[in-house]
Amino acid sequence: MAANPSRVLLAASRAAPPAASALLRPLVCAGGTCASRYLTHQRRQFARQRFGRRHSGDEFDTSSFDRSEQRKANKNVLVVGSSGVLGKTLVTHFGRQHKWNVVGADVSPPDQSAQKGLGDFVQLPKDGTLADLTGELYKGVSSHLHGGETDATHLDAIVCASGGWAGDVDWADMMERHTEQANASELEDVNIEEEYAREAARVCERMLRMNYFPVVAGGQVGRRFMKSGGLFVIIGASAALSPTPGMLGYGSAKAAAHHYLQSMGPASSEENDVTSVGILPLMIDTPANREMLGADDGGGDERYNKMVKPIHIAIEIGEWIERPHLRPHAGSLVKVIAKNRRDGSGGAAFHLVR
């Protein structure tokens, strides 16, 4: 097979954390240089293992290894948010490409395209508390896995692909709409400050429901149904690694998801050898995001470089499920950088950030 010049390489850390002695050495250095050198060393070590394992476009280069032995045992994978653009890609890739048993879960029922590769589906409540969401997910997974009484009916992986974006409430826009409505209806004046506060709170609450609640629910279900050596993946956001003015609700919810992932990572690794990893794209290539960026109206490759194709994320997670020794260490946050071009070529690079 000819080498693909557009293939990309993941640089991340080993699955196992460093020994205690290795962690102590950087403390004697000043200015953070040792920590930087240590992270660079981890990236290089992991890159060496993954040399020759790169992906681009919608195809995967399998010339460097044989999957026949790895596919003998079927795997059970739960995809939370299976009806979204990324979720459907995950379901199709896991179910059809890998022939795994995929259980989907979402507030929206699966459409025809999402059913390709989908084994079972759990209907989640659209509204309600976090406890309601967790309870429904727990009952649904338990039913489809027949109680998880044997290792064969436990989950090999959980991927939380749910998410959504909303910006902050625009004060000027709200004032304009309020003035128009008041003039048209001649109703008594409403306290616009109170309305603004309520609307801003609604946005934050909606972002928590979409971006944080599914992560917590998936994590709790994983405590019961994940088999030893399993993988727990969330989709975070690289924007939430720093302050997010203009989208406080979104940034806060994603940052909370990152914190949850990093906090549960070491504990779940010690208790059940489960690896928890966060994947942080800048923006996923979806119809809604293309419309927001105007990516279909021209503008060159720069706009396309902002958006990671869902298939690249699906391929990477599939490799982590199939080959555990390629996973980053528990609690890692891995940033995804798109390398797309307007002609459809390119790929994605995955880099450890925390």
Image (tube, grey):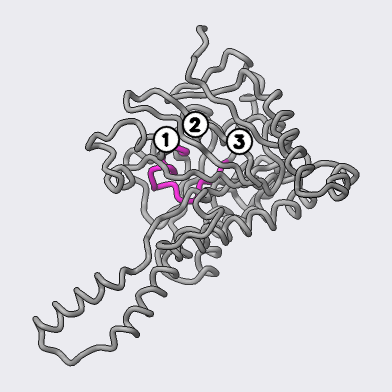
Q: Where is mark 1, residue-wise?
A: 309
Q: Amino acid at mark 2?
A: Ala
Q: x, y percentage for residue 272?
A: 76, 49
Q: CA distance from mark 3 to mark 1?
A: 24 Å
Q: Where is mark 3, residue-wise?
A: 75
Q: Amino acid at mark 1?
A: Lys
Depicted 65 relative to depicted 119: above or below: above
Visible residue check, residue 136: no
- The residue carrying pointer 1 sits among few (fewer than 14), some (14 to 19) or many (20 or more) residues within 10 Å by Cα, namely many
Label 2 near label 1: C-beta < 8 Å? Answer: yes
Q: Where is mark 2, residue-wise?
A: 348
For the point 56% across and 44% down, which residue is it?
A: 279
For the point 66% across and 20% down, which residue is it?
A: 69
Q: x, y percentage for residue 310?
A: 43, 37
Q: Amino acid at mark 3?
A: Lys
Q: x, y percentage for residue 33?
A: 76, 43
